[in-house]
Image: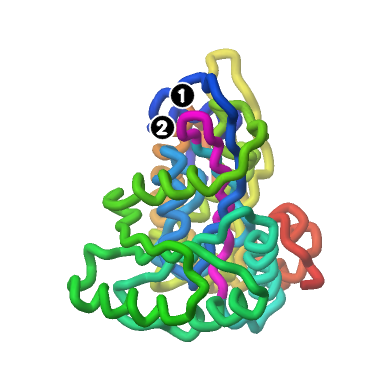
Amino acid sequence: MNEANSENQGPEDVPSDQPEVVVPTGPTRCGFCALVGAPNAGKSTLLNAMVGSKISIVSPKVQTTRSRVTGIAMAGACQLIFVDTPGIFSPHKRLERAMVAAAWQGAADADEVVLLVDTARRTVDADTRSIIDRLKQGGRTAILVLNKIDLIRRDKLLGLAETLNQDGIFTEVFMISAETGDGVEDLRAALVRRMPEGPWLFPDDQLSDMPMRLLAAEIVREKLFLQLHQELPHSAAVETEAWEEFDDGSAKIQATITVQRDSQKAIVLGKSGARIKAIGAAAREELEHLMDRRVHLFLHVKVRENWADDPDRYRDWGLDFNA
């Protein structure tokens, strides 16, 4: 078990690094932007940079994002609603099929599709090629975003851009580093220009529609994978079981980490419980920073071999069990 500190605020109450919103005097704009790409292309990092706060978990492991995560960014009179989708790849298991189906649904519903490409790979990988082909077959255009430009030589970057542009589906091309912020503001400005006129769909200080209980579970899952990215596969889930408020403003959060085998439980616990204590301490620190209160965080680990075949868990993630 591990203890930590926080309060029952919604993500909309999380302090944001967004510039102060100016009340618009002219027509407002509002639209949906779907961030798609192969696993680990940097979609979650870009979403967090656009929103100005931690909304989507970031991990060196691929396929970290399991469901569609909505982040809301204000840019003057425009409200940009970003949908961070799971990475698109060739699925084999039920959970993988549901994740990929959620990604394509997010793209279908969006006003603009933003395709992120990890330029550090220095080539167009099979998953990215498959995404481009499907967009082309569906008659969809997209904005091409070449990410991680700080990790590739300029001549290689320009060659990759030229190769991708030959597909004829990209309306604009941006070269950015979501990690450092280089080029992100230019991309934001272009998205603002492309959004349709219309009323805002959320209050101007709301950052996400993700429930706080789910965000807390996602932060624990991120720290789990950051600690165990070599030892633990994606056969782990985290669920917030209880949330209790106290008069002093602090909150008690109980979360359960579910794995499929006893051997995985032993890995998560670590020697004398050292690993789960470290995971809990890192999660507690981030929750306290996000919500600006004390959190008492208690983590438990249980084994459930077939948790990935539980329809209720898919519903909680906003995924289609039968995809």
- Per the image, the residue denoted by label 2 is 18
Mark 2 and 1 residues: CB-CB less than 8 Å, in contact?
Answer: yes
- Quadrant the C terminus occupies: bottom right
Residue 273, visible in the rendered structure: no
Magenta run includes residue 167: no
Query: How crowded is the residue under tag 1: few (<14 C-alpha within 10 Å), some, or many (20+)?
Result: few
Q: Position of residue 209 (x, y in %)?
A: 64, 39
What amino acid does circle 2 point to? Gln
Magenta residue span: 74-88
Residue 21: which disc? 1
Q: Position of residue 252 (x, y in %)?
A: 58, 31
Where 31 falls versus 207 (above or below)? below
Q: Is residue 253 left or right of residue 122?
A: right
Identify the element where label 2 is drawn.
loop
- Residue at 31% in and 58% down: 176
2 vs 285, nearest the viewer: 285
